[in-house]
Image: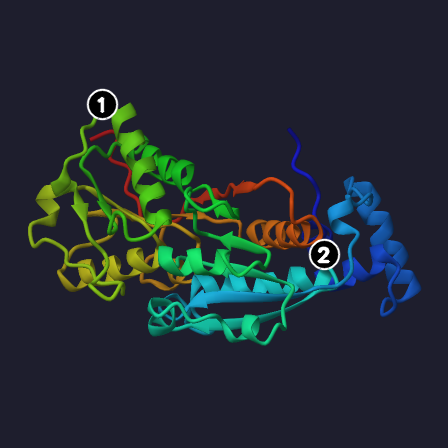
Amino acid sequence: MAKSVRMADIAEKLGVSIVTVSKALSGKDGVGNELRNNIIKVAEEMGYNTKKSDDEKKDSYFIGILNSYQYLEKGSSFYWSLYERLLTYLLASGDLGVLEVVSENDAANLCVPKIIQDKRVDGIIAMGPFPDDYLNMLGGLNIPLVALDSYKAKFNYDYVISDGYYGMYTMTDYLIRMGHKKIMFVGTVGETSSISDRFYGYCRAMRDAGIIVTEDMIIPDRDNAGKISVDIPVNIKHLATALVCNCDFTAYEVSLRLTAMGIKIPDDISIVGFDNYILSEMSNIKITTYAVDQDGMAAASVKQIRRRISNPQKNRRVKIVSGEILIRDSVNDISNL
């Protein structure tokens, strides 16, 4: 099935912003006639669907975006990057977004976000993991809600998530095809739904290759506060030829620890990450990773929240957004050894 053309694709082809494409295709002011006509022409050539569904033909909305303090670092985190993309797609839809960072104390005390208390927003996008009690509290506020990059089956919300299961299956299968059999998983299983999904994908790939996963093949990557912290066993070279890291931040930390131990990547140990976060390219050796489609997740979240606001009674929808593997320099091919 052919991938549908998005405004982001048109913008990339023409070297303009998504907002400019949106204005041109919707007939809004702010775009010159020559550029507008060119955008329309290219959109038609690329097969862009200009017919919008009822969910997309609504007024402008003010959307609150929530993220936990422990997962957000301005300018240098996966969620900050995702937040920036949300703002871009909200603006392209004629909407506005505002971020509220939720502290651990506020989440533990079930404090209602200020943007909801002030009745400033039409809907909420809860970005990233939150405690169950806090999510349950948000769901009881009678405000449209979409959970982004987190999934809790017991809550009847709309969800937009990356395909962590298949993505990590792909990464692990790639290592296996490169000749690796002693592959360990680096991640605190159960810490978040994303880590668990990725662990299950790793386990399935290992099982399909006839490799039994045991508890001693898991290296935790979080401390008691949920921060990234990895302790690499001193005999790691005897335990594994490859490490599957649940995210690029963890992969970056692992690369630093291995280097400090005098272990060469990928000559001694191969590593892979997940997310295609900037750290995967900032390390001493560029890390092979699974690129999460942040644009796709942001666009789907905006569409979902607009749908939920305009049609509150519609059935719950779970949108899974696929990504792709990016092969770089951190994996050694030992298939012929």
Chain-order first, disc 1 or disc 2: 2
Residue sitting at 24 percent across and 66 percent down? 225
Name the disc covering residue 210, or none. 1
Tag 2: Cα neighbours inside 10 Å, few (<14), some, or many (≥20)? some
Q: Is 13 situated left or right of 86 in this image?
A: right
Q: Residue at x 18, y 58 (%)?
A: 258
Secondary structure beneath label 1: loop
Label 1, label 2: how far apart the Cα atoms are? 45 Å
- Look at mark 2 in the image and give the residue it sits on: 11
Q: Quadrant of residue 333?
A: top left
| Quadrant for the C terminus in the image | top left
Q: Look at the numbered discs 1 and 2 and tell me whether their residues touch, using CB distance below 8 Å.
A: no
Give coordinates of residue 204: x percent, y percent.
Answer: 30, 30
Q: Quadrant of the N terminus?
A: top right
Tell me: residue 256, above or below residue 174: below
When the figure is inspected, residue 203 is found, relative to residue 310, above or below; the finding is above
Q: Position of residue 54 (x, y in %)?
A: 78, 45
Question: 28 or 274: nearer the eye?
Answer: 28
Residue 260 visible from this viewpoint = yes
The amino acid marked with disc number 2 is Ala
Instruction: Tell me which amino acid carries mark 1.
Output: Gly
Position of residue 109 measured from the top left corner of the image (x, y, whole percent): 35, 70
Outermost residue on the right side: it is 33
